[in-house]
Amino acid sequence: MTTAAHRPATLEDVARLAGVSRSTASRVIAGTGFASPDARDRVATAAHRLGYVPNPAARALVSGAGVRLVVAVAGTSAAVLDDPYVHRVVGSAARVCTPAGVGVALHWLPLGEPTGLDQLARDRSVCGVVLVNTTEDLLDAIPRSLRGRVVSIGIGSPTVPSFDVDNTAGADAVLHHLYATGRRRIAMVTGPQWLPCSRRPVEAYRGLMRQAGLPERVLPGDFSAARGRAAAGEALRRWPDVDAIYAISDETALGVIAALSDEGVRVPSDVAVAGFDDIPLAAMTAPALTTASHPVGRIATAAATALLDGRPAAPVTLFPSVLVARASA
Amino acid sequence: MTTAAHRPATLEDVARLAGVSRSTASRVIAGTGFASPDARDRVATAAHRLGYVPNPAARALVSGAGVRLVVAVAGTSAAVLDDPYVHRVVGSAARVCTPAGVGVALHWLPLGEPTGLDQLARDRSVCGVVLVNTTEDLLDAIPRSLRGRVVSIGIGSPTVPSFDVDNTAGADAVLHHLYATGRRRIAMVTGPQWLPCSRRPVEAYRGLMRQAGLPERVLPGDFSAARGRAAAGEALRRWPDVDAIYAISDETALGVIAALSDEGVRVPSDVAVAGFDDIPLAAMTAPALTTASHPVGRIATAAATALLDGRPAAPVTLFPSVLVARASA
DNA sequence: GGTTGTGGTGGTAGCGCTCTCAGGTGTGCG
DNA sequence: CGCACACCTGAGAGCGCTACCACCACAACC
C-alpha cells in the first residue's frame, strides 16, 4: 500500500505514476475543471496508492486561501481563553474545519485595542475570523480588508453576519415560567455589561418586570459560578423577600444555588433559580436546573461553515432557545 | 501607519523599503543568521511601518515546518470531540500555539483504524500531534515518519513522550481519604476499559481494596454524568450496604450524586461520593465535591510546547494530583 | 604578501501547489 | 469542407518565503 516514502508523496509523484501532467492531477484532486473519466480514475488510484495528502500550506500559498480559522475572543483578560463556552466554539469549529484541512486558532482580543484585528487582517493564512464576545467597538474596528472573512457569534453589523441564540426569547421563556409559577420578587444576575449579549437578557428582564409592575433587581456578574455565588449572597442581604433568581448562565445559576444552600435557603421552595445555556451538567445538579437551551455547537458550526464556504451569510441567523423546566424553578 | 495596502505587505516590500535584500530582511525577521545592527534596525522599522505579518503558509512550505498542531482523539465515536476534557486540551494548546503562528486542529481517530495517523504523517503542514485517549494499539500504529512529532496525553512509549496526571496518586489520595473517614464498602465507577488512563485508577482501587481486605465493586462507565447516574442506581441495587462511591471523573460523580438524591440516599452521611479532576463546578454543587485535582491546562500546555520546541521531551512527565476534600466525602 | 577566518550581504533555487493559457482532440452544423 | 464549440490536456509562471551558496570587506596571523 505504501512505498518506503520517507518523503511524503507530492502531486508530482501522483501525476507521474498516473501518467498525466501535474495540471491534470491537480484538477482531479481539487475537483475543478475538466478531466476525462479515464484520467480521473488513474489519478485517483495513484493518489490512493501513494497515500497522497495535499499540502495545505502550498495550496494556501498559491490560491490565497487561508489555512487557519481564528476564533477571536474579546475580553478584559486572557482568562476568556479558559471559558468553557469558548472551548465549545473552538471544538465545534474544529469539527467542520479539519476535514477541509483548516486549522483553528484561538485568539484573545484585549478590549479596546483593535491591533489584534489588524494583525489578523494582514495574515494571509487566515481564512476567516469568528468573533466571540463581540462589541460594537469591535465591529467598528474591523479593517476593510477583513470584510467577508469575519462572522460574529453575538451581535453583527451590515458587513459582519451574526450567528446567535435568541437571547430575548430564552430570557422571556424563563421569566414567564418564573412568573407563571407564582414568583413575584425576581432578581437577576447578569453578565459583563460591556457585552451586548449579556445586556439583551437584562433588557428582556427589565421590560417584563416593568410590564408586570414588579421591582427590578439586577446584580452584576460575569458568567462564572464564583460571581453567581457572591451575587446570591448579596441578593439575600439586599432583598430578603426575593423568591426567584434568574442567572445569565448555568454556571452562575449553580453558584447561586450553592450560596443559597450555604444560607439554608431551600431551592426551589424558598427561592427558585433558573439559568441559561442548558449545559450537560444542568440535569445532574441537586436540584436539577431549570434553564433555557443554547445550542452553542450548532451556532459555532454554522458560523465556521459560513466562513469556510466563503459565500456571504445571512445578516442575522438566530437559533431558538427553549425552556427546559427541571426542579430548580 | 499603514499604506492603502489592499494587498498585505510581503517580505519583498519590507526589504525594498529598508533598502536591503530579501535575504537580509528574512534573516532579521526570522532572527536567524547575521545582520548588522543598522540593517536590523531598518528592517524592523520598515516591517512595522508596513504592518508586515509573515505568511505562515509560505514559511511552512519552504522550511518544512508545519502550521498546524493536531489534537488527535481516539474514540469509538465522533462524540469524543464534544468532550469538555478534549476542549480544554485544545484551548490550552491554542494558547501556546497561536503566538507561534500555529493553528490547532481537532481530529478524531476511530478506534482500531490506524488510517488517520497515516494521513497525518503524510501531511506536511502538521508540525505535531497530541494524542489524547492514547491506547497501546495507537502507539504501535504510529508511522515512523511521525516520530518526534508525536506526544501523548496519557500513556507513552519509548518514542512517544507522555504527559499525564499521576492517576495512581490521585486515586490513592481519594481512596485513602474515603478509608480514613470510615468508609469500608467502597464501589467505583470506571471509565472505558479500552483506555489505559481509566484502567490505572481501577488498578489502584483494586490494589487498595485487596490490601485492606475489602470487597471489590467495579461498575463500568465512560466519564459522562449520564453513565454515572445509571451506575449509581445499579450500585444501590447490587450492594445495598455501599457507603462510598468513587467515580473516575467529576462529571460521573455528579451523575452519581444525582442518582443518589433521586433514591433518597443522603450524601455524604449515607454514601460518600468522590470524583477526579476538580472541575470548576466541583466546588459549586450540593454537596460540594470531594475530588483529586487534574491540571489539564498545564498538561496540555506542556505537551504542545514540547512539540513546538521540537526538542525531544522527557519520556514521561507526570503532573501531581492532590486531594481536594470538600463536603461530598 | 598571502592565507585564513569572521561578520555581513545579496543572488537565486526551489518548497508543492493552482491557475492561466495555448494548444490539442473530437463532434455538430452551416 | 470549414468552422465553431464543446471537452480535455500540458507547459509554465508564479504564490512568499527560507536555505544555500557565493561573495565582499576587514582584521589577524604567519
Image (cartoon, coloured by chain):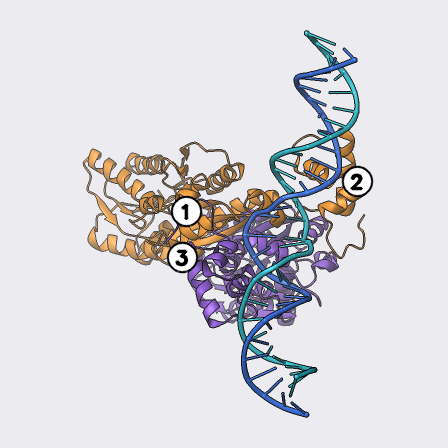
Chain colours: A orange, B purple, C cyan, D blue
The picture places residue D13, in percent across and down from the top left corner, at 63, 44
**Who is closer to the viewer here, A316 or A150?**
A150
Q: Amino acid at mark 1?
A: Val
Q: Where B189 sits versus C17, above or below?
A: below
Q: Which is closer to the viewer, label 1 or label 2? A: 2
Vertical position of residue A275 compared to residue B36: above or below: above
Q: Earlier in the sequence, mark 1 or mark 2?
A: 2
| Label 2 – label 3 distance at C-alpha | 48 Å
Residues under labels 1 and 3: Cα distance? 29 Å
Bin the neighbour count of mark 2 within 10 Å (Cα to Cα): few under 14, some 14-19, many 20 and up. many
* Residue sitting at x 26%, y 50%: A219
Q: Are marks 2 and 3 in contact (CB under 8 Å)?
A: no
Residue that numbered label 2 is attached to: A18
Give the percent coordinates (x, y) of residue D12. Answer: 68, 43
**Screen quadrant of the C terminus of chain A:** top left
> Mark 3 = which residue?
B49
**Residue B255 can be seen, yes or no:** yes
Q: Residue at x 61, y 43 (%)?
A: A99
Crowding around mark 1 (Cα neighbors within 10 Å: few <14, some 14 to 19, many 20+) is: many
Q: Amino acid at mark 3?
A: Arg
* Pointer 1 residue: A132
A120 relative to A210, above or below: below
SS assignment at label 2: helix
Question: On the picture, is B277 further left or further right than A187?
Answer: right
Which chain does tag 2 point to? Answer: A
- Name the one closer to the observer, A304 or A184: A304
Q: Quadrant of the rendered structure where residue A203 is?
A: top left
Mark 2 is on which residue type?
Ala
Judged from the image, the secondary structure of the residue bearing numbered disc 1 is strand
Which class describes the residues within 10 Å of circle 3: few (<14), some (14-19), or many (20+)? Answer: some
